[in-house]
Image: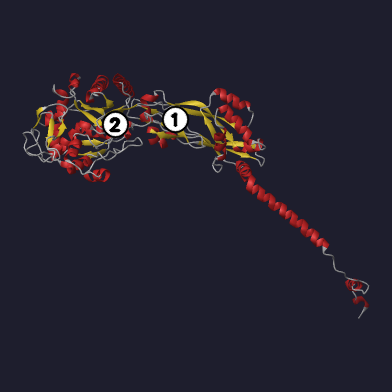
């Protein structure tokens, strides 16, 4: 080997491997010390995580979520509701609302956010727990602020600003104001706040039916923050667009008169409850609707516990025994079945008797409201003879039918068929929420409910609108309007300009309609007619009265329905007085004055 073939690293390696070097194992103590420190650190970390997860998750979760940039809603003004002439029935009044900024609450008041919420509750006069619940329940996925109060008075706004906290936000808002509250409340309804959001939504009446159009489109802005929650920039993303105006079919002046006259009529009787409605029978446009007692829809919550239930819309949701107002339907059905003709007559001594198989000495008597003498279809409608419609609806034998001889009548099956044909068990589809449906009695239903068989007496009762038969006022007026306009039932509605919509058509019943319309004309036109008080009106009017005994004959509901002019109807009216003193006569004067006002001012 040559000398210059020896490299430096070989020489160094030989030195390292010299015999003078001795290798010794390390002690285990350093390993135990390092492992123990690492284990201690891991244990501390896990304990801290468990503590935060068990006790601080809500707090830090809120802080984390609140620091995220989110859209803030700019509420749109709701559309204005007007009557058919464009007169506003509701307005939007500028006001203030108080919101809690979640980010600022947990940043600026991290030590004790509950203390700040307590101060807010104290100024607003709210339950502190209610305020805390609003904040705890806020949906931080969609909003960083929660509205805790609306329509805040100016003095409270001043006190709020004096708190000097960015967590308490005073924002411009508006409140929905109803100037003639009780007059229009059953029609217009009211709004409510939506959970923790700044928007309002319709909760009843037209406010609910047309909420989507009235609500408009909310605007939005976004707040950008740094990691510490400090506001860096606010940017408006889109402008709020006010809701669309809603023009209704209501005649505002007529509604006010109807409401005032009805209240006056009830007060003179010492009563408080009833229904008044007016509509155009040709189009289904509702011109007026009164449900008494009414309420102030600026503060509907004040009536939640009222035993008179003013929030209940009796015209749409109430179900009543119709009394004699059902007799035109029975007459149409009997004529259509060729059971009678208009000259078919019955003698009424004031009652119809049926033998009592259990006590022959005491026959069952079904009363007329007074002796009527001999009546045919026209005079039976004009006089509202019960005996005539007992015979037409339930039939009779030769021994019980006075001098008529045997008459089989429609019977309960046919009555039920025609009730359904005229929609008495169906909704009209009117554009106000919470419409009820009527109740149609039947033998099977009665037997299942009472464990007693259906009797001829039950058929007699429902033939004159008594017993278990029930209909809504709006359905009853819709049916009556269909007679007025020649057999076409128009869907009632409140949206001005809506295309008329037909829900049933029996205009082909020409002979039947001519006969019944003549009888309804005689109700007003004949001296013995039950609504002859309307004879002095400036136009020919047709009508029908009714008295329905309820609560085991302890109370009487009084009805009047009328339309006019008789040959070209433009107005149909219903008046219902609950718990009237002397039957239908209590409703007729109100109907008279309402129809007179409409003629004098609109025709």
Q: Which residue is drawn at 85% across and 68% down?
A: 25
Residue 301's label in the rendered image is 1
* In the image: residue 357, left or right of residue 181: left
Quadrant location of the N terminus in the rendered image: bottom right
Query: How many other residues sit within 10 Å of disc 2, few (<14), some (14-19) or many (≥20)?
Result: many
The x and y percentages for residue 599 are: 24, 21
Q: Residue at x 5, y 34 (%)?
A: 403
Q: Which residue is drawn at 66% across and 50% down?
A: 50
Q: Nearer the viewer, mark 1 or mark 2?
A: 1
* In the image: residue 230, left or right of residue 18: left
Residue 24 vertical placement versus 407 (above, below)? below
Label 1, label 2: how far apart the Cα atoms are: 30 Å
The x and y percentages for residue 96 are: 53, 27
Q: Could you say which is closer to the camera, residue 59 or residue 122?
A: 122
Tag 1 secondary structure: helix
* In the image: residue 242, left or right of residue 56: left
Badges 1 and 2: C-beta atoms under 8 Å apart? no
The x and y percentages for residue 329 are: 18, 36
Q: Farthest residue to the bottom: give it.
A: 1
Tag 2 secondary structure: loop
1 or 2: tag closer to the N-terminus: 2
Colour convention: secondary structure
Q: Could you say which is closer to the camera, residue 48 or residue 429?
A: 48
Residue 396's label in the rendered image is none
Q: Could you say which is closer to the camera, residue 162 or residue 486?
A: 162
Q: Can the viewer see residue 535? A: yes
Label 2 sits on residue: 285
């Amino acid at each position: 080997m040559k000398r210059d073939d020896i490299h430096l690293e070989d020489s160094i390696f030989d030195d390292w491997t010299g015999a003078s070097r001795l290798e010794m194992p390390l002690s285990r103590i350093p390993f135990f010390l390092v492992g123990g420190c690492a284990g201690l650190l891991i244990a501390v970390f896990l304990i801290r995580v468990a503590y935060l997860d068990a006790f601080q998750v809500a707090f830090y979760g809120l802080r984390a979520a609140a620091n995220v940039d989110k859209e803030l809603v700019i509420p749109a003004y709701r559309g204005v509701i007007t009557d058919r002439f464009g007169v506003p029935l509701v307005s939007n009044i500028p006001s203030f609302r108080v919101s809690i900024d979640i980010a600022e609450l947990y940043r600026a008041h991290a030590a004790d956010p509950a203390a700040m919420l307590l101060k807010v509750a104290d100024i607003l006069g709210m339950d502190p727990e209610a305020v805390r619940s609003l904040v705890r329940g806020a949906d931080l996925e969609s909003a960083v602020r929660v509205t805790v109060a609306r329509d805040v008075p100016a003095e409270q706004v001043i006190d709020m600003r004096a708190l000097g906290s960015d967590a308490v936000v005073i924002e411009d808002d508006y409140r929905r104001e109803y100037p003639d509250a009780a007059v229009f409340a059953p029609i217009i309804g009211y709004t409510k706040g939506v959970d923790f959001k700044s928007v309002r939504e319709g909760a009843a009446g037209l406010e609910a039916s047309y909420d989507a159009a009235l609500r408009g489109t909310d605007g939005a802005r976004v707040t950008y923050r740094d990691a510490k929650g400090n506001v860096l920039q606010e940017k408006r993303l889109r402008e709020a667009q006010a809701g669309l105006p809603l023009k209704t079919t209501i005649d505002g002046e007529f509604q006010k008169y109807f409401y005032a006259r009805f209240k006056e009529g009830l007060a003179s009787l010492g009563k408080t409850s009833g229904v008044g409605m007016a509509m155009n029978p040709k189009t289904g446009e509702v011109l007026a609707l009164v449900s008494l007692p009414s309420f102030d829809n600026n503060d509907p919550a004040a009536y939640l516990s009222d035993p008179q239930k003013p929030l209940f819309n009796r015209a749409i949701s109430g179900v009543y025994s119709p009394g004699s107002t059902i007799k035109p339907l029975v007459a149409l059905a009997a004529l259509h079945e060729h059971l009678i003709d208009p000259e078919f007559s019955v003698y009424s001594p004031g009652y119809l008797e049926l033998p009592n198989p259990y006590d022959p000495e005491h026959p069952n008597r079904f009363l007329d409201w007074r002796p009527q003498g001999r009546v045919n279809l026209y005079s039976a409608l004009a006089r509202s003879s019960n005996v005539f419609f007992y015979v037409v609806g339930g039939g009779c034998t030769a021994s019980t039918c006075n001098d008529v001889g045997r008459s089989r009548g429609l019977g309960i099956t046919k009555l039920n068929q025609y009730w359904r044909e005229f929609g008495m068990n169906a909704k009209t589809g009117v554009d106000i929420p919470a419409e009820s449906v009527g109740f149609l009695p039947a033998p099977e239903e009665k037997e299942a409910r009472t464990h007693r068989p259906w009797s001829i007496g039950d058929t007699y009762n429902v033939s004159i609108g008594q017993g278990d038969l029930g209909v809504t006022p709006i359905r009853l007026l819709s049916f009556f309007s269909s007679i007025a306009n020649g057999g076409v039932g128009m869907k009632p509605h409140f949206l001005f300009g809506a295309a008329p919509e037909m829900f049933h058509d029996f205009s082909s019943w020409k002979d039947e309609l001519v006969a019944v319309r003549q009888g309804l004309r005689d109700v007003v036109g004949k001296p013995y007619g039950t609504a002859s008080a309307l004879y002095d009106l400036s136009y020919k009017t047709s009508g029908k009265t009714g008295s329905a005994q309820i609560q085991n004959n302890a109370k009487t509901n009084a009805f009047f329905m009328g339309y006019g002019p008789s040959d070209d109807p433009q107005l149909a009216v219903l008046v219902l007085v609950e718990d009237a003193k002397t039957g239908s006569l209590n409703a007729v004067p109100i109907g008279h004055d309402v129809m007179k006002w409409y003629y004098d001012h609109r025709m």
